[in-house]
Amino acid sequence: MTSPSADKPKTLEAMKHFAEQYAKRTNTYFCSDLSVTAVVIEGLARHKEDLGSPLCPCRHYEDKEAEVKNTFWNCPCVPMRERKECHCMLFLTPDNDFAGAEQSISMELLEEVKASLSA
């Protein structure tokens, strides 16, 4: 049996893979500042670990567990699926001023951002 801490890198890697695949599938791009992308992916991974679902990390919730059950803000959230509107700036349409050219991000950058958030 693996410990929860051993699963954390796997969760971060899974969220990285999800974000890259979803960006490619929806013709969206990560923010031109990839540190924004890294913070959002790290937040999704943390919510996946803590709540069992990748709840949008960029919103405030009175009751996160209730929001997970509601599913509206689970990534990809309803506004993203319906209108390609990502509050977190994780998935940006090519015409967005903040959209970069990337649909991938390195694990090194994700780990670096995660470490700086933990410090």
Image (cartoon, rainbow, N blue to C red):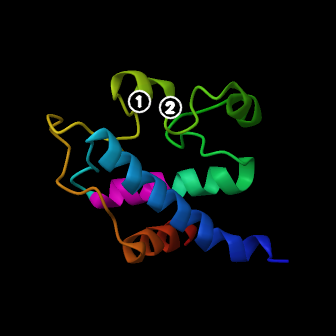
**Quarter that holds the N terminus:** bottom right
| Residue at image mark 1 | 80
Please indicate whether residue 114 sits to the left or right of residue 11 in the image.
Answer: left
Q: Is residue 45 above or below residue 25?
A: below
Q: Residue at x 14, y 34 (%)?
A: 95
Is the residue marked by circle 1 packed among few (<14), some (14-19), or many (20+) residues within 10 Å?
A: some
- Secondary structure character of the magenta stretch overall: helix
Image-quadrant location for residue 102: bottom left
Q: What label sits on residue 77 in the rendered view?
A: 2
User: Where residue 56 sits in the image (x, y, percent)?
Assistant: 54, 39
Whether residue 56 is situated above or below residue 35 in the rendered picture: above
* Left or right of 58 on screen, residue 23: left
Residue at 45% x, 51% y is 40
Q: Residue furthest right?
A: 1
Dot label at residue 57: none
Query: Which image quadrant: the C terminus?
Result: bottom right
Q: Amino acid at mark 2?
A: Cys
Residue 41: x and y in percent read 47, 55
Residue at image position (40%, 60%) is: 38
Q: Is residue 22 left or right of residue 78?
A: left
Indicate whether residue 95 is drawn in magenta: no
Q: Position of residue 75 (x, y in %)?
A: 52, 39
Is 37 included in the stretch rendered in magenta? yes
Q: Is residue 26 shown above or below 52?
A: above
**Badge 2 local density, few (<14 within 10 Å), some, or many (20+)?**
some
Distance from the alpha carbon under mark 1 to that under mark 2 = 5 Å
Tell me the magenta residue range.
Answer: 34-41
Residue shown at 18% from the left, 35% from the top:
96
State yes or no: discs 1 and 2 in contact (Cβ < 8 Å): yes
